[in-house]
Structures are given as C-alpha cells and as structure tokens.
Amino acid sequence: MNYEKLILHSDEINELLARYGVKFGIYKNNEFKEQLFPYDMIPRVIGSEEFAVLEKGLAQRVMALNLFIKDIYSDKKIIKDGVVPEEFVYAGSGFLVECDAVTPPKDIYSHISGIDLVQGKNGEWYVLEDNLRIPSGASYPMIARELCRRCNPKLYVENHIEENRNYSSLLRKVMDHVNTGGHSVILSPGRYNAAYFEHSYLAEKTGAHLATGAELIVENDHLYFQDYSGNKEKVGVVYRRISDEYLDPMTFNKESVIGIPHIYDIYRKGNVALINAPGNGVADDKGIYYFVPKMVKYYLGEEPILQNAPTYLPYYEEDMAYVLEHFDDLVLKDVAEAGGYGVVFGNTMTKEEKEKFIAMLKNEPRRFIAQEVIDFLDIDILDEGAIVPRKADLRAFVLMADQPYVWKSGLTRFSRNPDSFIVNSSQGGGFKDTWVLSQ
C-alpha cells in the first residue's frame, strides 16, 4: 500500500493530535492523569472480501446480543430453557433489577457496540470481548485520518479505502431513529473524563448538544436542555457517556453528582431515549461472553459466523478440571474488570502466586474465565524510526438503527511493549487507522 509518504509526517501528525486534545485520561491512585494516545502512521489494512465476512458476523452477533438483553429484562426464556444458567445473569454486576420490564424505544438496547477482535496467525478472527455499555474509541481513527488527509489528500482515493467520515452520520441516524421528539444530546461527565475529547468531537460532528448533567433537567415528565441564559429546549435522545450507576441519583447511586435526577423515571415512560440502554452490562460480562455463540443459535437459528477465543468457565466442573490441568497455558480474566486490568497469564506466576490464585478460583469460580492464549498476528509499527512487529487488536463498531450498520473502519490498538499482549490505552498502548479496501 502507498502509505510511505505518511510516515514522513509522523511527528507532525502526533503534534497536531496533541494540540487537538487527542489524549487519554486515566485515574490512578485516586489521581487523574492525562496522557497522549500515541498514533502510529502505518495503517492496518483489511481486504474487502475479508471485511465482508467480519461485517456479516458482527451484525449477526450484535443482533443476538440485543435479543438476549431484551429477553433477560422481559420473558427470560433463555434461562428457562437452560441455555444460560441464572447464576450467570443475576450474580453479575451488570444485571440491574431496576431495568426489569423496562423497554427502550424501538426495542434497541445496544445502539453502539464495540466488539474487540484479534486475528490469529492462521488468519482466523476471534472475538475477545463485547463492549455494550459505553464503548469508546471511534473518534481517534476519525481525527487521525482527517489530519492525514491534509498531508496527502489523494491517498485514500488512490488506495481505494472505504470512507470513515460516515461514522458521525451513522451515529446521527441511530439518534434520530430512537428520538422521542426533541433535540439530541451527548451527555458527558465533563472535562476530566477519560474520553472527553471523543464526547466533544462527536457532538461537533453530529450537531448534538454537548452537555453535562447540570445542564439537563426533568420537568413535567420530559427532559430539557437549559443553556446559560436559562432558555430550555426539549430533549428526545441522550447519548450518555456516563455509567449506569451515575446516571440518575434517584434510581441508582444516590451520591452521584454528574447524573440527572428523575431521568430514569421518564425513560421508563418512553419520553426520552438513552443510548446505550441502562442494564446492558448484563450482556458484556466476561462470563456471559462464553454463551454468545449459543445465543446466536438460540435467537437467530443460525450458526455463528465469528467465533469466541477458546474459553472455559471454572463454574463448570469439567472446565475447572481443564483449567487446573492446563493452567500454565491459559490467560485468566476477572469478569468484573476492564481496560486490561484483572488479566493474568498462568505461565508468568510464581509457585506461591499460582497456589493463591487457584485457591481463589476454587472459592469464586463465577468470578473468572480462562482462555487459550491466541498467537496474535503481529502487525508493523514505527518505533523510534524502525519498523517492528507488535501485538494488536481491532475494536469494530456496530451501530443499530432500523438495522445493524457495521462501520467500515475501526480502532486498531497495539502494544508498545514487545513482550506484552495487552493493547489497552490505559495500559500504555497506541492506536492506528484501519483501512478497509473498497475493492
């Protein structure tokens, strides 16, 4: 691919990204620290035929997950039929009893899904994780490509690359599809949130109001945006970038100061749409992930196109026996953790650490999953002027309106540590643009 000229502008592009505020904030030791999200100029390239398979598989998976969430908060047939044990639903932190029997506008729960995949060296794609609560990251390849166009405006046409600027129009389509009547709002916790750049960037691109909880009020069973002059505008859809527990202090965490009192009351009545729906965490629990291929068969009557990474649940006796026998060959994940935290590799533990972990595993089998360590396909990055291989994943975005729309781009994250499989930005990783070929 003809991207060599981009490499010459690497420092310039990263300086511009820093100037635009393309940073990633993390809380560590109760302190907020903001750091640059390093951008690598060498793109990940996916052929059109290969992406067509991913597109079909991602749409299938998200449709099944939406049906699962709807079922769990209504008839619970998948539990009654013994496909998913009730312990895996009700014992998970993502299940919210407050969401039971609450149906969102148009029956859509996961309007924006971020599905994390890795490609093995055999060329096979595996799903590592489903992010259905507040998946972030689409803005980073958007702004990076926007800046790269300034360096070489013809590059993407000459290389037959699918457009990625349409993410904002897809997001707008989603918001308009479920809007109950009124303005669209992107709800942000504010400047010190880890993804604040994305909140403001997507608000600008979609034409939605960027607001904090202090600017939104509930009156007469409707939601209003109130500007600095006191003028009020009715709101019909809120793309909320705050967690469930902080959304409404009257329903969830009463100590929340970033939410909107009584917004959940009017959501129950169908007077405002929330993107994504509260309670989605029931479906992106790492324990529930094990059952997604079964969901595809159960709800859609189809064979899953995309496969999970080989996964074992210590909850089941036979899986526990396998995990204990092959402990050194597996990666163990705490289902309650995210962002690369709570992930341990069996072969990196000392004898004492293994004994302690296994005791904890036996005592809390629901808390962990175990997976085979997939030998990721290495992709090239620039490291101090040299091209070197590093592990990388792909966060693909599926947006749900009248049908699922798979964005023909994505966020490729890579590890800057040559010995690490952890690519999360919170763990020091960088990101790339993802080029999907149009032919």
Image: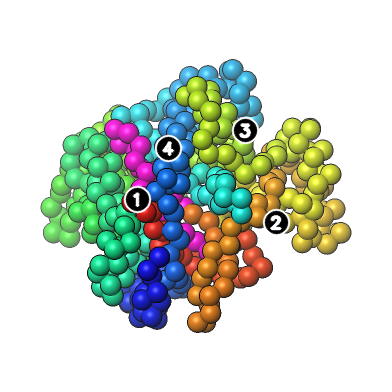
Sequence-first tag of 3 and 2? 3
Q: Is residue 288 left or right of residue 347?
A: left
Please identify, in this view, whether the residue under mark 3 or under mark 2 is nearer the observer.
2
Sequence-first tag of 3 and 1? 3
* Residues tagged 1 and 4 counted as in contact (Cβ below 8 A): no
Residue 198 - label: none
Per the image, the residue denoted by label 4 is 56
The region drawn magenta spans 395-414
**Is 157 in front, or is 184?**
157
Sequence-first tag of 1 and 4? 4
* Residues tagged 3 and 2 counted as in contact (Cβ below 8 A): no
Instruction: Tell me the distance, in whole angstroms, between the alpha carbons under discs 1 and 4.
Output: 17 Å
Per the image, the residue denoted by label 2 is 344
Please identify, in this view, whether the residue under mark 2 or under mark 1 is nearer the observer.
1
Q: Amino acid at mark 3?
A: Phe
* Residue at image point 70% right, 38% down: 313
Per the image, the residue denoted by label 1 is 439
Element class at badge 2: strand
* Residue at image point 27% right, 36% down: 178
**Is 18 in front, or is 326?**
326
Element class at badge 4: helix
Per the image, the residue denoted by label 3 is 88
Instruction: Tell me the distance, in whole angstroms, between the alpha carbons under discs 3 and 2.
Output: 22 Å
Please identify, in this view, whether the residue under mark 3 or under mark 1 is nearer the observer.
1
* Residue at image point 20% right, 54% down: 207
Q: Is residue 215 above or below residue 31?
A: above
Instruction: Tell me the distance, in whole angstroms, between the alpha carbons under discs 2 and 1.
Output: 40 Å
Q: Amino acid at mark 4?
A: Lys
* Residue at image point 61% right, 23% down: 83
Residue 259 visible within the image: no
| Label 1 crowd bin: few (<14), some (14–19), many (20+), radius 10 Å | few
Element class at badge 3: helix
